[in-house]
Image: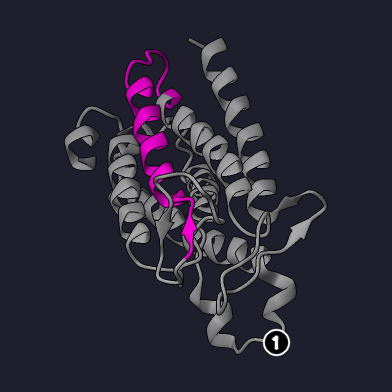
Amino acid sequence: MYWAHARLHPKPSLAVDRWLIVAGAIFGAMLGSKVLHVLAHLPYLYEQPLSVWLAGKSLLGGFLGGTLGVELAKRSVVWHQSTGDAWVGAITVGVIIGRLGCQVSGLWDQTYGVATHLPWGWDYGDGVARHPTALYEAILLAISYIGIRCLKGKKGLRFASLMAAYCVIRFGLEWLKPPFGPAATGTLPTALYGSFTAIQWAAILGLAYFTGRIRQLRNNV
């Protein structure tokens, strides 16, 4: 899906510049996903071995870290045009497939919701009907993508809109997960920083950045 759309978007002429931007995305996403995972569970990780610190990942952290890595790489090669719009469809489909996998993988990947009496409550294997939060995320992202495809404007608007929508989705869905309800036995507890989790704080910061980016792009059309 990416390559089908990439042909329609400008890119740096030098291959080394293109690969530097790709490297910025990869390493930024890797670092961001790990850092946000650690912050989400930090008070409880001190008693865990290093393997537990390194095992988890955060998709939101990957998106924010990847975006930062790309922007820094683009500055280093003096490339000012957007590189994100070509990824919108691929990211959406990739997240939906991934979240469907999370939904059927059980409790271990920490994407489960708190207990619910709703008829579509999902048993992740512990005998408790829970909010199928990964499925909610896939549905909400698909709906967002339908609206984003209708956007017209400057390059970069669709990517910024997708990221802003994802920040809103993640902020809202966190209320349906621990610690806003008991964590499942054997899983890593999630920490609160004030009234919010680390993921919610990251979603707030991400939304502020991408909302500002959307406003900038609309004003420059």
Rendering coords of residue 33 (x, y %): 52, 61
| Residue with the most extreme left position | 4
In the image, is residue 8 above or below residue 124? above
Res 19 quadrant in image: bottom left
Q: Visible in this render: residue 83?
A: no
In this rendered view, identify the residue nearer to me: 43 or 11.
43
Q: On the rendered image, what quadrant is the N terminus found in?
A: top left
Q: Is residue 5 left or right of residue 55?
A: left
147 within the magenta span? yes
In this rendered view, identify the residue nearer to me: 15 or 88.
88
Q: Visible in this render: residue 34?
A: yes
Q: Residue at x 33, y 15 (%)?
A: 150
Q: Is residue 165 left or right of residue 195?
A: left
Q: Residue at x 66, y 57 (%)?
A: 181
Res 124 quadrant in image: bottom left
In the image, is residue 40 above or below residue 138? below
Rendering coords of residue 184 (x, y %): 56, 70
Q: Residue at x 72, y 83 (%)?
A: 46
Identity, as a three-letter code, of the amino acid under mark 1: Glu
127 within the magenta span? no
In the image, is residue 188 above or below residue 73? below
Q: Secondary structure at mark 1?
A: loop
Q: Residue at x 52, y 43 (%)?
A: 71
| Residue with the most extreme bottom position | 49
Rendering coords of residue 139 (x, y %): 36, 37
Rendering coords of residue 187 (x, y %): 56, 75
Q: Residues within 10 Å of mark 1 (few under 14, many from 20)?
A: few
Residue indicated by mark 1: 47
Specify the segment rendered in magenta.
Answer: 128-157
